[in-house]
Image: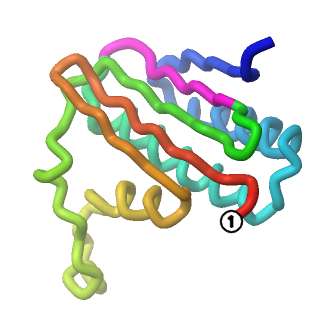
Amino acid sequence: MGKPKIELKLPILPDMELVAINTAEVVAKHMDLSDDKAAEISMALIEACINAFEHSRAENNIFIHFILEDDSLVIKVIDQGIGFDKSNVEIPKIENKVGTDERKRGWGLQLIQELMDTVEFESTKEGTTVTMTKKKES
């Protein structure tokens, strides 16, 4: 038997990221991850979903894969949108954001990287895949 894998296909509709979060919580419990790790996974997943929903300009669905490894959880968030050049997304300087109404653009990526153990972005004109890994032991 291969590694358990859960695949979600979510239409781009309001609050659909909640479906992903519910799944993440079930998976985290199944893997005996701590409440803290489960919360970090959920926060990172919300950011990744919102990025895909808001910025990809994908017209149909986003896909989320949960791959249960022996020592870690791998989550892929896949959209078939326009892609992006990560080097063009400025990681914002906190002092420039404080007290301004500036959109949170760029925060999501930084937050995801802080919440998860490893994060990889692959992006082409056919879409973007964000691969996030949370180790069981850290």
Residue 70 within the segment the image draws in magenta: no
- Magenta residues (range): 59-67
Q: Is residue 36 left or right of residue 126?
A: right
Q: Residue at x 45, y 22 (%)?
A: 62
To which quarter of the image does residue 89 belong? bottom left
Determine whether 43 is above or below 97 in the image.
above
Left or right of residue 95: residue 44: right
Which residue shows up at 68% across the image and 65% down it? 138
In front: 116, or 64?
Answer: 116
Residue 41: image location, x then y, percent: 63, 52
The type of colouring in the image is rainbow
Tell me: residue 101, above or below residue 79: below
Which residue is at 67% across, 41% downward?
Answer: 73
Looking at the rendered image, the quarter that the N terminus falls into is: top right
- Give the farthest residue toward the left: 88
Name the amino acid type tagged 1.
Ser
- Left or right: where 122 falls relative to 16: left
Residue picked out by circle 1: 138
Q: Could you tell me which secondary element the residue under label 1 belongs to?
A: loop
**What residue is rendered at 37% in x and 63% in y?**
110
